[in-house]
Amino acid sequence: MTLLTEKYAAIEDAIARIPDGAAIMVGGFGSPGTPFALLDELLAQGQKGLTVIKNDANEPDIGIGRLIRAGRVDRLIASHIGLNRVAIEEMNEGRLTVEMYPQGLLAEKIRCAGVGHPGFLTDIGLDTEIAVHRREIELDGRTCAIEPAIHADVALVHADVADTYGNLAYRGTAINFNPLMAMAANLVIAQAFRVESPGSLQPEAIHTPSAFVNHVVRVDRATSEQGVRAHAV
Amino acid sequence: MPSDQERILARAAREILPGQIVNLGIGLPQRLFHYMPEDLEVLVHSENGILGCQPLADGIAPDYEMIDSGGAYVGASPGASVFDSALSFAMIRRSRVDVTFMGAFEVDQQGNLANWKIPGKFSPGIGGAMELAQKVDKLVVLCSHNDKRGNPKILRQCRLPLTAPRCVSLIITEKAVMAVTEHGLEVVDIAEGLDVNELRAATGADLIIDESRLGRF
């Protein structure tokens, strides 16, 4: 058990707890919410044989794109990897196993793990090719597919502000998968632009309560190097 | 003379009603932002987790944590909210989104839609399209009438893997506006300067056309 006051960690020490072969959830939808600093430290430390669970594959030279390029990722679970041509090539060449789910089902599978349910029932995709690998049951006369929860060893998340107990608050569209993943893994490491002392955050403003979070790391504001891309409207 | 895409977008904007919650698919549909009247009171939903997004005004610096699902920087319109991905799809599955606009590789006269995968050629994943297609009450397809080689995209029966079966309400191309009805595909509007025979020749589906009621756009 980590003492409450010992959650504020150096990035090297927090990431060093991740072993080879770990299944790692990574927050973010595209760049916003992606914990770029944590991912760059993971790249530097060299862990390999990883399973990564993220909505997308970032872009080839940022975020998990760098891990994929470096051959550290064996398996990727995602909903759309269209912005990362390297990941698509690796998938097509058979070097990267990719499992894809509709985005809302992916989110719900992660949410289920986070709330302690083994899975859920859905009517999404019943008459499409994604139904092929699923078990179906009848419930009150309706056909439903069983979607098992997705658990992970580690979650790497990005918050706007945290406190040293591990409470987290997110901002804007950088929320996305972060609060879901922060509940769904055994070891949760958060990066935040600000890390305050306990009591600084309004209790009502906290999105992820400290109980779910193991380590908090402070990072500088996103820079272009951390993967901010100028997108056209 | 408007371009084909401008014609599609201008016509599509007329399908949005005051008070609606609207989702704009990646690509052409996201340009609809610029075709909606300024005083039209709607909330634009983007599945990455915002209800009430709008294009950045000129000269406003982007907020790096505010994008739409296509990756464009956006602002929050008055009354906007932001939320996580599970909640965003709860909004979709509970049909709280009134209308969604999407592109298509193929769409057929039963309202089946294929827009996510070409086996062996293109399979980046389905993203949010399946849930939007299955659960939003009104799905409007915006696409070119024919592919780059001139083959029809509007068919009797889709051949590619479906995004969702029987989900399309309306198809808007540069040539026609077609409603999916229980009787089949009814042409509502036809493009200025096009005649009915030319439209039929460019289409791979059976079209129901009542020339006395046909609109022009």
Image: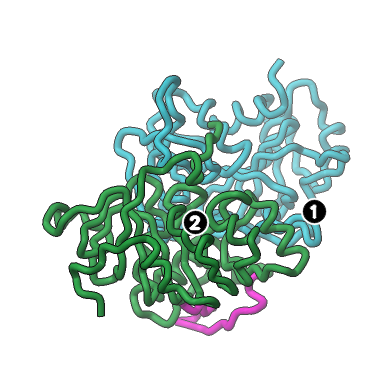
Chain colours: A green, B cyan
Q: Which residue is drawn at 35% across and 52% down?
A: B83
Looking at the picture, which amino acid does disc 2 mark?
Asp
Image quarter (top left, top right, bottom left or bottom right) of the C terminus of chain B: top right
Q: Nearer the viewer, residue A109 or A199?
A: A199
Is residue B86 at all visible to an observer of this figure? yes
Residue A134 appears in which quarter of the rendering?
Answer: bottom right
Q: Name the residue under label 1.
A: B156
**Farthest residue, direction left:** A199
Q: Is label 1 in a helix, a strand or a loop?
A: loop
Residue A229 image point, x, y percent: 53, 39
Q: Residue at x 75, y 43 (%)?
A: B208
Q: In this view, does A206 lie to the left or right of A99?
A: left
The question of residue A228 being in magenta is answered with no
Residue B43 image point, x, y percent: 40, 39
Q: Residue at x 39, y 72 (%)?
A: A184
Q: Is residue B205 left or right of residue A22?
A: right
The chain ID associated with circle 1 is B
Relative vertical location of residue A50 with respect to residue B149 in this rendering, above or below: below
Q: Mark 2 points at which residue?
A: A40
Circles 2, 1 touching at the beta carbon (< 8 Å): no
User: Mark number for residue B78?
Assistant: none
Q: Nearer the viewer, mark 2 or mark 1?
A: 2
Residue B161 image point, x, y percent: 73, 62
Q: Which of A223 and B46 is in front in this view?
A: A223
The chain ID associated with circle 2 is A
Looking at the picture, which amino acid does disc 1 mark?
Arg
Distance from disc 2 to disc 1, alpha carbons, whole Å, reads 50 Å
10 Å neighbourhood of mark 1: few (<14), some, or many (≥20)? some
Relative vertical location of residue A123 with respect to residue A38 in this rendering, above or below: below
10 Å neighbourhood of mark 2: few (<14), some, or many (≥20)? some
| Number of numbered labels in the structure image | 2
In magenta, the rendered stretch is: A130-149
